[in-house]
Image (tube, grey):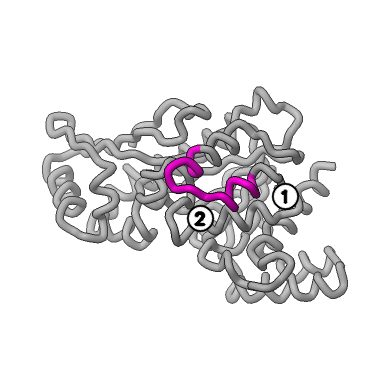
Amino acid sequence: MRKTKRTTWRNVVTTKSLVLDTDDDFNDLKQRIESDPRYAGLKKLCRYHFREKRIDYLTESIYPNRENNPDRIPVLFLFSNPYPDSVSRCLFLSEPHSRGFWGRLSESHHFNDTKLQQLVREWDDSTTPMRIAQFMVQGKYENPFLLYFHCLWSIPTNQVGDLKRLFKGKGELWNEKVDKVSKEELQSLIDDWEIKHIVVFPSVIFNEITAQIAPKGWRGSIKDAVDTFRKDRNITRYWESLSGGDAQYKSSSDVHVYLALDTRRKDWGKGMDKRYFTWAIDMILDRILRRVS
């Protein structure tokens, strides 16, 4: 997998390449993508180059330019891998089952931005995804943070299990061409933008990049901690009950990794002032502010 140039606000969708060592690996992966209905979305995003044994595919990221925002705190929102439909729409989590993420983010007391709320409220599939993408990459929201959106594994599939299944029986290929290169790219992103805080949504990625395993029952623990905090407003007790959800990045003790609720739980707590998903994000961002102050 070759790294591409850093995206600009005009180009949140980029092309990356998976270069195979043998004709057999190239033909086998091509056949899996072309014939298995689980990869119908990925198939639309791929181009094949037989001579080079190279598969080009579209993927996504949101990297605001910190040079234009030197005083803001860079925070990385880290996901597993992109949804093909969202890549096609040019915005993270923009396919119908996932776009509620942007509503939850707009409800945060840190991102309670009227522009973002308006974009979410007036959602139009033909224009809103790119408008939100540009808004986020330009960093036009009013708060101390600068959000980066990145997927650990850049190949788009509907589920991370589908991505692993694509490489079933090809452990060395997965380890060397996908996983190893992906983690090197993550490290470069952290170094380039001096990121010290990573918010992880799926627990599988938390397990991948920290030296510990997500606590058993972590979703319920976050829910219970939010319920308790709403009663007593004791932030210390909140984090004491979630001590396993605040860890160090494997490669640097200076980088903190926080476990949020996964996006499938973004609608937990209907009828609340804020959903549990948004509460978890707010508590993490509050903790970051305390750490840097």
Mark nearer the N terminus (2 vs 1): 2
Question: How much space separates mark 2 and mark 1, taking CA atoms?
Answer: 17 Å
Decide if residue 228 is on the left or right side of residue 255: right
The image quadrant of residue 70 is top right
**Residue 126 is one of the magenta-drawn residues:** yes
Q: Which residues are magenta?
A: 116-130
Q: Quadrant of the N terminus?
A: top left
Give whichever of 89, 5 is nearer the camera.
89
| Residue toward you, 74 or 206 | 74
Residue 134 percent coordinates (x, y): 55, 34
Tell me the SS state at disc 2.
loop
Seen in the picture, residue 46 relative to 35 is either above or below; the reply is above
Residue at horizontal 63 percent and vertical 41 percent from the top: 147
Q: Secondary structure at mark 1?
A: loop
Quarter of the C terminus within the rendering = top right
Question: Which residue corresponds to the image point at 12% horizontal and 40% vertical from the top-left?
Answer: 23
Residue 248, percent across and down? Answer: 65, 52
Question: In screen coordinates, is 173 left or right of 96?
Answer: left
Q: Which mark is residue 168?
A: none
What type is the residue that disc 2 sits on? Arg
Q: Residues within 10 Å of mark 2 (few under 14, many from 20)?
A: some
The residue drawn where x is 15% and y is 40% is: 22
> Which image quadrant is residue 267 in?
bottom right
Residue 128 relative to residue 173: left or right: right
Vertical position of residue 21 compared to residue 256: above or below: above
Which disc is residue 112 wearing? 1
Tell me the chief SS of the magenta region. helix
Q: Which residue is mark 2?
A: 99
Viewer-side residue, 55 vs 10: 10
